[in-house]
């Protein structure tokens, strides 16, 4: 999608947005400034402190502006918020489509993720209970509904994807790269054996020994 004009005033100020790419452009008098739409897809009534200070130095009132990655005249806020809502809806739809495709490629992925989160929740709540002197165990955390381990054999491909995902977060660049590559293999319909081979052979030859 190309930039679409959403605001123009009598002084020649124009604001354009691209809600596919998440970009915006403010232009006036032959000069323009591009910036990204806010990640949280929201505008703010209050400007960042440093930005507000800069506007005061120009002899203008910060209350006449709003912030969405860039300070803009408040007259443009209704149109800009409409554009942000469109951007947010597109982001959500794209995310849901990616998640649906990933679930199709790795059946049971969402179920495994939910089970893992539930176990983390239980562990955290149990630790809080043990640290709470006023709770002697009479108010234990809600038990885990289904253990993660019991689901691994049912959804081996999804479990392998989550293992690759963990690798991708490693501090070691080689391990992280192997994790990302294995994730891509599984997401694109590649074989589990191919993904396993990548995960099992991320160490350089110099680190191998008999």
Image (cartoon, grey):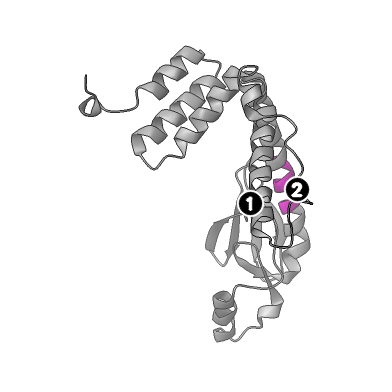
Query: In the drawing, what numbered circle is on residue 127?
Result: 1
Residue 124 point in image, percent of width and height: 64, 49
User: Residue at the spot x=59%, y=84% of the render?
Assistant: 56
Query: In the drawing, what numbered circle is on residue 140?
Result: 2
- Please determine whether, in this image, residue 163 is positioned above or below residue 51: above
In depth, the one of 173 and 16 nearer the eye is 173
Secondary element under disc 1, as helix, strand or loop, is helix
Whether residue 31 appears in magenta in the rendering, the answer is no
User: Residue at the spot x=56%, y=75% of the render?
Assistant: 51
Q: Quadrant of residue 46?
A: bottom right
User: Residue at the spot x=71%, y=53% of the render?
Assistant: 84
- Please determine whether, in this image, residue 148 is positioned above or below residue 44: above
Secondary element under disc 2, as helix, strand or loop, is loop
Report the magenta stretch's main SS.
helix
User: Residue at the spot x=64%, y=58% of the render?
Assistant: 131
Q: Quadrant of residue 73?
A: bottom right
Q: Earlier in the sequence, mark 2 or mark 1?
A: 1
- Please determine whether, in this image, residue 14 is positioned above or below residue 167: below
Query: In the drawing, what numbered circle is on residue 209?
Result: none
Q: Name the image quarter holding the N terminus.
A: top right
What's drawn in magenta, residue-wise? 83-90
Residue 146 point in image, percent of width and height: 72, 29
Residue 205 point in image, percent of width and height: 23, 24
């Amino acid at each position: 999608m190309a930039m679409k004009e959403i605001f123009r005033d009598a002084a020649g100020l124009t604001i354009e947005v691209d809600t596919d790419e998440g970009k915006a452009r403010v232009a006036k008098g032959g000069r323009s400034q591009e910036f990204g739409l806010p990640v949280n897809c929201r505008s703010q009534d209050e400007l960042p402190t440093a930005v507000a200070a800069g506007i005061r130095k120009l002899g203008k009132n910060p209350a006449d502006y709003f912030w969405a990655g860039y300070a803009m005249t408040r007259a443009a806020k209704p149109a800009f918020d409409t554009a942000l809502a469109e951007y947010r809806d597109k982001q959500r739809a794209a995310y849901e489509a990616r998640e649906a495709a990933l679930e199709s490629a790795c059946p049971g992925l969402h179920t495994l993720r939910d089970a893992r989160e539930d176990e983390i929740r239980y562990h955290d709540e149990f630790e809080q209970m043990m640290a709470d002197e006023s709770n002697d165990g009479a108010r234990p955390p809600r038990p885990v509904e289904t253990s993660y381990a019991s689901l691994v054999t049912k959804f081996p491909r999804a479990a392998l994807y989550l293992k690759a995902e963990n690798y991708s977060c490693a501090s070691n660049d080689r391990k992280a790269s192997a994790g990302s590559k294995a994730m891509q293999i599984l997401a694109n319909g590649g074989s589990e054996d191919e993904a396993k081979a990548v995960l099992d052979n991320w160490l350089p030859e110099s680190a191998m020994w008999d």
